[in-house]
């Protein structure tokens, strides 16, 4: 008997806005969620659309059951950043001499607007979530923000660890043991996340794209950027293809244009290319998503991760 194709414990879905990341991430989450595989679907994209894609009305600001064995969570970047800065400010207030307290507060307030702060905050929130998730979830599926932001997020753990190491090395004898413990804990989350992201048996990166020249060029760049980080996509999903047998002159012209745009794309990418035909009607709601996700799994989405069809 063929077993259902398995997904690694952590799956990231990345790509340009509008290509179908949220749809594919929610589809995989719906397909893998099972009583023996509790699943968490997380969005870190500021343009949240999990609620729309899942067709549920309520808030997802905390892990919320959306189907049996499936919880969903939208991390609000602004809220996450505010909590992160409050935490940093409290830590610095304990370290800094009283005459510098006003300056500490001024610097933390300035950091709220500095580039990279949101990424740092989201990275730490995600690192913590991924470290704590195994106690509750077998699978975590992450619907990431568009490409540039995502890669910044993946680069952050190493940089943030270096910063914390320097602080801990210089200060650990002089400062409050509670602060040192807190920094060690935060460093531990980042270290665990860096190890997790670098382990292809535990983490898969799926790039979602469209059969259009600009989208494919961006996907090729995203793949190179992953490679530079020592990572590789588990697969690329080419979404919303027009079927070859679609009726009408426009549809067949569209199909031909997509085939021409794809050209030799697959051979250049050196990873499985999953072709997903456009669904009519749109894949909204758990049942429709589950069918899409099962199709992606059967097409070999994770076949190259060592967790393929047994
Ligand atoms: N295979 C598909 N067939 C039909 N519509 C799709 C498909 N994939 C995505 N869509 C639709 O395209 C739009 C963008 O998809 P979404 O998953 O929100 O993209 P992203 O998260 O990359 O911005 C949504 O309206 C979604 O329902
Ligand atoms: Mg989205």
Image (cartoon, rainbow, N blue to C red):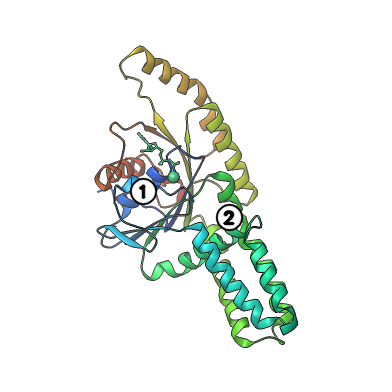
Between residue 225 and residue 26, name the one nearer to us. 26
For label 1, the crowd category at 10 Å Cα-Cα, with few meaning under 14, some 14 to 19 and many 20 or more, is many
User: Which x, y percent locates residue 256?
Assistant: 44, 17
Tell me which numbered mark, 2 or 1, is placed earlier along the sequence: 1
Give the label on residue 26, or none: 1
- Regarding residue 265, the answer to whether it shows in the image is yes
Q: Residue at x 53, y 30 (%)?
A: 265
Answer above or below: position of 272 versus 68: above
- Regarding residue 192, the answer to whether it shows in the image is no
User: Which x, y percent locates residue 241?
Assistant: 40, 28
Q: To which quarter of the image does residue 166 belong?
A: bottom right
Q: Is mark 1 within 8 Å of ligand 1?
A: yes
Answer above or below: position of 131 versus 14: below
Relative placement, left or right, of 170 versus 283 is: right
Q: Secondary structure at mark 1?
A: helix
Q: Residue at x 36, y 68 (%)?
A: 136
Q: To which quarter of the image does residue 147 belong?
A: top right
Relative placement, left or right, of 291 versus 219 is: left
Q: Secondary structure at mark 2?
A: helix
Q: Residue at x 24, y 58 (%)?
A: 68
Quickly name the residue at label 2.
154
User: Which x, y percent locates residue 175?
Assistant: 68, 86
Answer above or below: position of 262 versus 52: above
Q: Quadrant of ligand 1?
A: top left
Relative placement, left or right, of 67 versus 128 is: left
């Amino acid at each position: 008997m063929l077993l259902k194709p398995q997904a690694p414990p952590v799956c990231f879905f990345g790509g340009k806005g509008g290509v179908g990341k949220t749809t594919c991430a929610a589809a995989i989450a719906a397909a893998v969620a099972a009583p023996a595989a509790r699943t968490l679907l997380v969005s870190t994209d500021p343009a949240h659309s999990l609620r729309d894609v899942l067709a549920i009305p309520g808030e997802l600001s905390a892990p919320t059951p959306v189907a049996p064995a499936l919880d969903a969570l939208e991390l609000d970047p602004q809220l996450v950043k505010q909590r992160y800065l409050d935490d940093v400010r409290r830590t610095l207030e304990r370290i800094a001499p009283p005459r510098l307290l006003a300056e500490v507060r001024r610097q933390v307030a300035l950091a709220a607007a500095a580039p990279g702060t949101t990424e740092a905050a989201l990275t730490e929130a995600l690192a913590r979530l991924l470290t704590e998730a195994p106690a509750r979830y077998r699978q975590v599926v992450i619907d990431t923000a568009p490409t540039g932001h995502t890669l910044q997020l993946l680069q952050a753990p190493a940089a943030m660890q270096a910063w914390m190491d320097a602080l801990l090395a210089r200060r650990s004898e002089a400062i409050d043991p509670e602060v040192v413990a807190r920094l060690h804990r935060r460093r531990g989350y980042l270290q665990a996340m860096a190890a997790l992201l670098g382990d292809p048996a535990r983490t898969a990166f799926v790039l979602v794209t469209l059969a259009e020249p600009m989208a494919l060029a961006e996907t090729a760049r995203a793949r190179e950027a992953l490679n530079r980080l020592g990572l590789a996509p588990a697969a690329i999903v080419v979404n919303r293809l027009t079927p070859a047998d679609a009726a009408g002159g426009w549809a067949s012209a569209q199909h031909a244009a997509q085939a021409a745009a794809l050209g030799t794309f697959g051979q250049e990418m050196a990873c499985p290319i999953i072709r997903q035909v456009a669904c009519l009607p749109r894949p909204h709601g758990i049942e429709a998503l589950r069918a899409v996700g099962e199709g992606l799994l059967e097409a070999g989405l994770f076949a190259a991760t060592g967790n393929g069809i047994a």
